[in-house]
Amino acid sequence: MSASSASVAALQGALAAEHAAVYGYGIVGAMLTGSEQADARSDWTAHQVARDTLEAMLTKLGATPVAASPAYALPFAVTSAKTAARLAAALEDGVTRA
């Protein structure tokens, strides 16, 4: 199977965004409780599934999937449920842009 370099690059960009989202939702969930935390856990799981799917697609295309970073710089300090919600929105924006 042959894929254009633009297609592989797009998939790699999406994968990088999913890696960041998986990391970020770990922080989001730590700042929430109750149903909000359950929602964050569900989003975290969905991003793990998307990450795994993209890795499999890239491997099938013969590309080496981009690795996750050990840590990611957050766009702002996450110190409360309110800032956790802002981070979740920022993560979703990043995935959408990718």
Image (cartoon, rainbow, N blue to C red):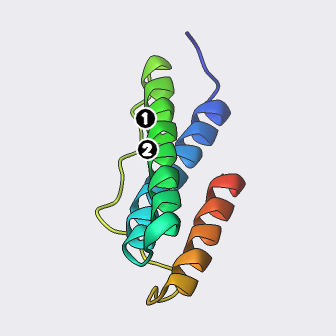
Q: Do labels 2 and 1 touch, CB within 8 Å?
A: yes
Q: Is residue 14 left or right of residue 96?
A: left
Q: Nearest the camera: 77 or 83?
A: 83
Q: Residue at x 61, y 20 (%)?
A: 3
Residue receiving disc 2: 48
Q: Is residue 18 left or right of residue 23?
A: right
- Residue 20 x/y as whole percent: 46, 60
Q: Residues within 10 Å of mark 1 (few under 14, many from 20)?
A: some
Instruction: Place residue 73 in its image quadrant.
Output: bottom left
**Image coords of residue 54 (percent x, y):** 51, 34
Name the kind of residue labelled 1 in the image. Answer: Asp
Return the residue nearer the eye: 94 or 66.
94
Q: Look at mark 1 in the image and give the residue it sits on.
A: 52
Q: Where 84 falls versus 11 (above or below)?
A: below
Q: Residue at x 41, y 44 (%)?
A: 66
The quarter in which the N terminus is drawn is: top right
Q: Amino acid at mark 2?
A: Gln
From where the camera sits, is residue 5 visible?
yes
Q: Residue at x 59, y 40 (%)?
A: 9
CA gap, disc 2 and disc 1: 6 Å
Circle 1: element type = helix
